[in-house]
Each structure stands twice: as structure tokens, then as C-alpha cells.
Image: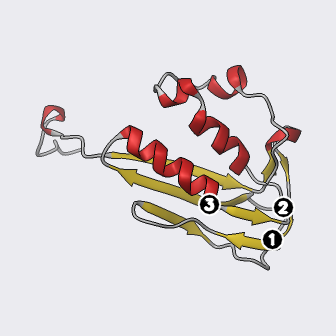
Amino acid sequence: GEPLPFKQRDIVHRGCAIECRINAEDPASNFRPSPGLITRWHPPGGPGVRLDTHAVAGYRVPPNYDSLVAKLLVYQPTRADALACMRRALDEFLIEGIHTTIPLHREIMRHPAFQAGQVDTTFIERTWMPSTNKS
């Protein structure tokens, strides 16, 4: 390919983005798929919050396809601000009728190691214990 017109040292960091993939799965049951009818849907909103989704109340999550229900993204000037924004957005996000990965994402965002940026690809298997909080 062609050389880029800039160098790595020329790139300036501008804020922090975090994405949570909301799947129709039950983390407390080894991420078993959770197809079914979404009976209640209350998405988060506000400055710096974006939700990419096809789901609404009344949508039936099929059993034979990708379990992705939504991508929840936040952008803020700092990592601390982005974490706070994502925690708020996850707390606002309400989906009923199916199990989702929202409780897992809530726990991850509140975990001290994640907040400190001390994570790797084994973080979940090393630190996460399913809670009794389901939604």
C-alpha cells in the first residue's frame, strides 16, 4: 500500500469511547442464548450516548441467528467520564422478556481493575462470578 501522509507521533488522542455489546444471552447460565419476545424496552440516552439497534418492545429475538440486540456506545473527554457515562447508560437501559448481558456489563464497569485499565483477554474468566441480578 501507499505510505500514510502522517506518522504515529502526529496522532493526538481526543477523548475516550467505550462500547458494550448487548446480547440476548444469560451470562449466569454460561451465556446460553435467550430468544423470545422483548416485552419492555427503555433505551438510555443523553449527551455522549449512542445506541445502534434494531430492537424495540414487541421484537421477537430469533433462536437461530446472532444474539446481538444492541451496541451501546459512549464518548467523553476522559476515560473516567466515559466510565461514569456508561455506568449511567447501563443503569437506565431496561429490557424485559429476555435475559441480556446488561448485568454483566454493569459489573464490569464497576470492577476496580477495569476502572484502572488493568485488564487483558482473560479478565472475565479470572474475575467474574455470576450475580443473582438478572435483567
Rendered image quadrant of residue 122: top right
Q: Compute the Cα span from label 1 to label 3.
A: 16 Å
Amino acid beneath label 2: Ile
Residue tagged 1: 38
Which residue sits at x=81%, y=44%?
133
Amino acid beneath label 1: Ile
Amino acid beneath label 3: Glu
Position of residue 72 measured from the top left corner of the image (x, y, whole percent)? 55, 57
Which dot, 3 or 2, sits closer to the camera? 3
Position of residue 42 measured from the top left corner of the image (x, y, whole percent)? 67, 70
Q: Quadrant of the C terminus?
A: bottom right
Asked if residue 110 lies left or right of residue 50, the reply is right
Q: Quadrant of the N terminus?
A: top left
Front residue (pair 74, 34): 74
Q: Compute the Cα span from label 3 to label 2.
A: 17 Å
Q: Residues within 10 Å of mark 2 (few under 14, many from 20)?
A: many
